[in-house]
Amino acid sequence: MLENVMEFFRNLPPKKCVSCGDKMEEQAEAYGTTCDKCRNSH
Ligand SMILES: [Zn+2]
């Protein structure tokens, strides 16, 4: 699973959630890799 996530992330542009694959707001840069939804569910 983790390997898939890493590979997934490498093939993505930087502003995309690695958890759900949704586009992220640039203001989420403090968290970098996950969107608001995924952040809130953690
Ligand atoms: Zn997400």
Image (cartoon, rainbow, N blue to C red):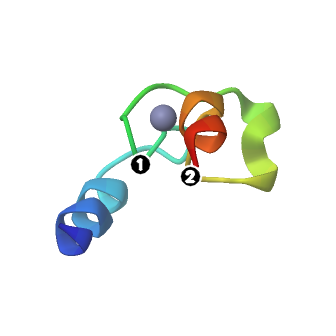
- Helix, strand, or loop for circle 2? loop
Residue at x 26% of width, y 71% of height: 2
- Spatial CA distance of label 1 from label 2 is 6 Å
Q: Residue furthest front?
A: 41
CB at disc 1 and ligand 1 closer than 8 Å = yes
- The amino acid on which the numbered mark 2 sits, given as a three-letter code, is Thr
Q: In which quarter of the image is the N terminus?
A: bottom left
Residue at x 59% of width, y 35% of height: 35
Q: Where is residue 29 in the image (x, y as percent from the top left)?
A: 76, 48
CB at disc 2 and ligand 1 closer than 8 Å = no
- Helix, strand, or loop for circle 1? loop
Question: Where, by quadrant of the figure, is residue 34 drawn?
Answer: top right
Residue at x 48% of width, y 40% of height: 17
Q: Residue 33 carries which label?
A: 2
Give the labeled residue for mark 1: 18
Q: Where is residue 15 in the image (x, y as percent from the top left)?
A: 56, 39
Instruction: Point out the tag, 1 or 2, that comes first from the N-terminus.
Output: 1
